[in-house]
Image (cartoon, helix red, strand yellow):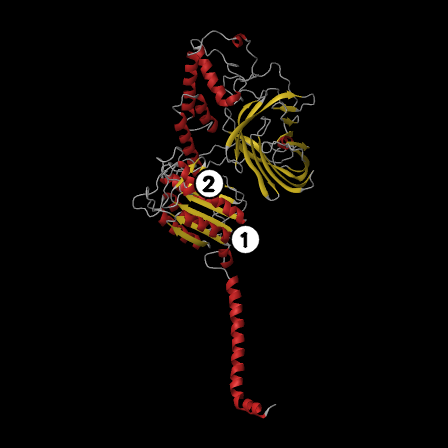
Amino acid sequence: MHPQATAWLINNVGVMLQVARSIRLLAVFCAAMAWLATAWAQAPAAGTGGAAEAARRVALVIGNNAYADAPLANPINDARDMAGALRDAGFAVTLLTDVDQRQFHLALREFGERLKTAGSGGAGLFYFAGHGVQIKGRNYLVPVRSHIVHEDEVAYAAVDAQAVLDKMESAGNGTHIVILDACRNNPFVRSVRSQQQGLAQMDAPVGTLVAYATAPGSVAFDTSRAGAKNGLYTTHLLEAMRQRGLKVEDVFKRVRAGVLRASGNKQMPWEASALVGDFYFHAPHAGAPEATGAVPAPAASMQVASVPAAPTSPTASSTQTAPQATPASPTAQMAQAAHDDALWQAARDSRDGADVLAYLNRFPAGRHVHQARQRLLDLARSATASTPTTPGPADGLPRPPPRTGSAWGEGQGAGGAGTDVSEALARLRVEETVRWGAAAGRRRAPNPRRNATGFAEGDRFRYQKTDYFGSGGVTDYIWQVDRIETDGSLWVNDGRQRLDAAGQRRGGNDEHTGAWIDYAPPIPLLEVAQRGAGVTQAFETTVRIREASGRTEVVALSGQLRSSGDSVRAPRGLPDLLPSLKVEVELRGTSQRSDGSVRRFVWQHTYWMALPLLLPVEMHIDEVVDGLPYQSTRHTMIAIDQLSLPPPDGDATAGAGRR
């Protein structure tokens, strides 16, 4: 080593030792900070699901007050309080107030990017308080500083609510929630031709819940209560979403109950949901019981009559009693009453019987059913009085034997001495039309063929179908036995449905896709019901599907059927509650398509059988294909014309059971 370098080292050895110690301390400090950073990232955040979870919960909250033509008082307060509640629930929140159209679109773009960052396990929430309008069935959220003069300008001056759903769906998160507190009076009513109020219902994509401050087509009852900081809907929403352990569906049930109560049943919040998993704003504590959306019962308890015992298996050692019927929750009762009243208000003064019939079809046991029947009767009298009284060719037909049909006049006397024939005819027309709608007046063929199970040609069963996943609508349909084959099997609806001799579906057209479906063997509902409660039976079936395009699919399903005692609401004209056997069907399997693709199926069906009624009185059908919901429907029998049923006591109509 050079002598000068050696001398420098000797003179500065103390300094070098201090530098070395500093480096070691710095290394230790860096390691400690790295450990703390890891610990902080893994530690749960107080009051939320953790820091990682907060990053995966993303919300955009917008409140607009400053509309030039129709300013609002509450939305900014609503938005600020909602943002605070969402932050408490672990959301990363963007809060904007009084935004114009350009700011709105930029916020949506940024929101979409943040949702994509959250990943497939994330959750997104969009909340808007302000003005919203529907034009030609589409919903538009109105920014401030929008100068809308004509209806055709709305699409260019406002923001299409569908754009929000599109942004959320394209992000591919697991859960999306859209809350629209925008169901106010149309501020541009003089500028548009459409007189539609409120917002239109939007189809929720899979994994999405869309919540409205009031029912589609309606406007909020109270948007600026005197002295209130928040609007009525958001007040109850903020209260419910802060409660720990409530699933999001139960949150909105509580909101609906509170708003209905506070508005005197004038405003009913609404949701359209296609969620496929559970979501909590505040998850329950470990080991804590899960909260529900039920609201406290009234102080006066409701007395419920006991239900007769359900049929039991011959091997059972004791009689199994069906559980007592549970009364509908106050939430459901208030919601049903509000719908009932609204539809009757629209129909009661109409001179078209179809409008009154629409009410009776939707609410066959509704609050105004007697008024509706009287209105139909008045309309029928008017029609009878305005037509010639010359007997038609059918008036001379012989009276059919008892219990062979429920056509107008069958099984009825003249009504007793002094009863006006026109009056009796009008009443019969009303009753038949209420029961069977467009199918009223069909006559059963004389001497119909029967099978050993009890079916007869001409038997018909009317169902009301509620679609929870697709259209979200309520429709009805009729199955009529047109022909009984030599083996006892049934042709229904001109062969569009094929049932075996026990009434179990062997094949038919699928109402969702139009494809033809065969079941080999059929699901043995009647067999299990006849064995009574407590049955568990393994079951396998092969389902063959033929689509209109010609593509075929074979699905191999296996699982089990379970029966238990229960009760079910009866069709019109029978006792309100019937003892029944609930048959739960759970089947899983895979399919092979003719194009080589493979799909996974999960079927969860529930049927309520109430013998001697030969077809299910109620059916809940839930099916999942490749992990995504395919259908979720409820089918409720609302009328029955079954030849083998005896007339109920005290019914003057021969062949009752036909309701």
At which x and y percent is residue 626?
A: 62, 43
Q: Please, what is the three-letter code of the amino acid marked with disc 1?
A: Gly
What mark, if any, has residue 92 been given in the picture?
none
| Spatial separation of the CA atoms under disc 2 and disc 1 | 25 Å
Task: Work out whether 548 lies above or below 628.
Answer: above
| Residue 516 picture quarter | top right
- Count residues near mark 1 (Cα–Cα under 10 Å), then give few for <14, some for 14-19, many for 20+: some
| Residue 1 picture quarter | bottom right
Q: Please, what is the three-letter code of the amino acid marked with disc 2?
A: Glu
- Relative placement, left or right, of 296 versus 483 is left
- Count residues near mark 2 (Cα–Cα under 10 Å), then give few for <14, some for 14-19, many for 20+: many
At which x and y percent is residue 154?
A: 41, 39
Task: Work out whether 380 lies above or below 552.
Answer: above
Task: Work out whether 552 lies above or below 142.
Answer: above
Circle 2: element type:
strand
At which x and y percent is residue 52?
A: 51, 58
- Would you name the residue on which mark 2 appears? 271
Circle 1: element type:
loop
Of residues 293 and 499, which is closer to you in this image? 499
At which x and y percent is residue 549?
A: 65, 33
Looking at this view, name the residue that lies furthest to the left: 227
Count of numbered circles on the image: 2
Residue 650 visible within the image: no
Residue 349 visible within the image: yes
Residue pictured at 49% horizontal, 56% vertical: 55
Whichever of labels 2 and 1 marks the residue nearer the N terminus, that label is 1
Residue pictured at 55% horizontal, 89% vertical: 9
- Would you name the residue on which mark 1 appears? 119
